[in-house]
Image (cartoon, rainbow, N blue to C red):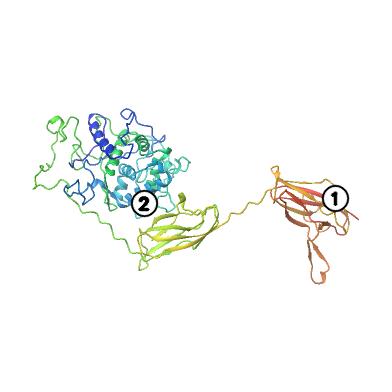
Amino acid sequence: MAATFGRRLRKGAASTAVAALALAALTASQAPGAAETRTGSETKDPASAGDTPIDGGSPYYTDLPPLNSPVPPGGSHGSGGPVVTGPAEAGIPATVLDAYKKAEAGVAQTQPGCRLPWQLLAAIGKVESGHARGGAVDAEGTTLQRITGPQLNGKGFAMIADTDHGVFDGDTTHDRAVGPMQFIPSTWSKGGPDGKGWGADGNGDGLKDPNNIYDAALGAGRYLCANGRDLGTQGDLDKAVLGYNPSREYLNTVLSWLAFYRKGTHEVPDGKGLLPVHRSPVGSGKGVGPAPGAGPTPGRTTGPGAGRSGNTAPKPGGNGSGKPGGSKPTTPPSTPGPKPGDPTKPPTTPPTKPPTKPTPAPVAALEQAGAKDLTATAGEDFGQIVRVRAKDTAGKPVAGVPVEFRIVGETGARFPDKADHVTVRTGADGIATAPRINAGDKAGSFTVRATAVGRKVPASEVGATVKAKPVPAPKADALARTSDAKLTAKAGTAFAEGAVEVKATYQGKIAAGAAVTATMVTDDPKHPVENDKGPYFAGAEDKGAGKDADKEKRVRSLTLKTGADGLLKLPEIRTDQHAGTFLLRLTTADGAVLTVELTVTP
């Protein structure tokens, strides 16, 4: 019962048996709603999530999972059964598997009603890139080499001119699907419901990189959950997958892997994942399989099970042994399998040793490598970045160390997505960089604590302060006197107390607390400047010194604020020995200007 599928689901009689087997397994293992009837699934694909599939209709891997259920290495296959090894197809590279599970947890926090299973991300990741080419990623989850699809130049695919200047896909003329989850750059950067794209920062490094499995998996999870979908129901699940590639064969391939992974998986070292072999043909429009009677897929040989171990699916009317209707097989197997019950024959799938996890590199210390103190105003982002460096006993940097950054305190400061903690792996230089922190709306102090996950190393902390947001100054765009009486006084005396009172308004409403500047100015209408003679404000004299101690420097400019009723009564205005007509100019920062005449008689 170790027979495996080596061909894509195809239309016609042969595909019916394969699809029936795959979907039967899926129905038996899925969450509630999986067994719902798919109305119209035999004749018409459900609508995709957008006008253009997320991967641009690029080719995808068509290998199907084996028929035998996954069993973790060393596990027992059934009650009292023999100890067997899980199929190699059930192994997922460690970092890639971690990214799928973190994406599931991240989406569960923001969209709990979606019920996204990480196994769906794994199924799509398998079909789109073979789990980032067997887990060829660095410690932070970034692919060692670009994974790109064909040029989306309209020849068999969507027509999408370059949108990222080649930053993500290396192509400056057209876009290409890129990364472990095969996002189109324009979809990643601009295709989201808010116009900001589906890109996400899944590893907390402050970047959104489709070539990073943590970022790509979280972005894919959010995309699959768009439009309020509940992936626990078959209809929404179908629509979500078809948003990637609107092909029924693509959907059936993904659902087959989803059912397979739901039965069990195991972790394998990065770079050791099993690579799929067969791909849908290039230039088929939307990544669908060849039409009935089409030639073989480029890169594969013909014959049953080509490129894969085991046998192909049985044909309709067969007896499960590969013989159609009891007739002889058209191509005999190259190596006959052992007879049932023959103890002298080795098993068809040799057992393998359980993958061993690498021993974590020793970490002796976490030291601050970024800002020593953080300061920001409430409602804004901190301009400083928190970084720590992991070092061993020799003082050398340690790469791949998971570092948790946690906000400790009572303020509203948070990392992106309102998280109070994030985990980031150190890079080749031993540095882990926390994502930028938003100060929140509450003033106060807090601490950002960095700890090496799973290591007994003292935490590293940096203090942070959130300043209260300045209260905006009240505005006033109009000033008017409350009396139109003429203002007259004799030289050497004072105008009547409270003679000048004004009312300030802003957009027709009372302007309480608005600043008003009152200045005695010259009568030059083009260049009014502060006058050095004539009226001045009482109680605003500066005494001189020395031989001029008997003289006064009289202040002729003051800035005052209106009361709660928008009124401002100027202090008493006195006069010197100069007679004539003088000007008092009142202004606000919002452009209000009022000029008042003051007459001084001899």
Q: How many marks?
A: 2
Which one is nearer the viewer's eye here, 181 or 174?
Answer: 181
x then y, percent, for residue 514: 70, 51
Q: Quadrant of residue 355?
A: bottom left
Placement of 600 over or under 286, stated as above or below: below
Which one is nearer the viewer's eye here, 147 or 304?
Answer: 304
- For disc 2, the neighbor class at 10 Å (few under 14, some 14 to 19, many from 20) is many
Q: CA distance from mark 2 to mark 1?
A: 79 Å
- For disc 1, the neighbor class at 10 Å (few under 14, some 14 to 19, many from 20) is some
Q: Specify which label sits upstream in the sequence, 2 or 1.
A: 2
Secondary structure found at label 1: loop
x then y, percent, for residue 93: 29, 50
Residue depicted at x 40% and y 55%: 423
Residue 181 seen by the camera: yes
Residue depicted at x 73% and y 50%: 587
Which one is nearer the viewer's eye here, 87 or 180?
Answer: 87
Circle 2 sits on which residue?
142
Secondary structure found at label 2: loop
Q: Which mark is in front, 2 or 1? A: 1
Residue 171 seen by the camera: no
Image quarter (top left, top right, bottom left or bottom right) of the N terminus = top left
Say what amino acid the circle numbered 2 marks. Answer: Thr
x then y, percent, for residue 281: 29, 36
The residue furthest front is: 79
Tag of residue 277: none
The residue furthest right is: 602
Circle 1 sits on which residue?
487
x then y, percent, for residue 140: 37, 54
Q: Quadrant of residue 303?
A: top left
Image quarter (top left, top right, bottom left or bottom right) of the C terminus = bottom right
Say what amino acid the circle numbered 1 marks. Answer: Leu
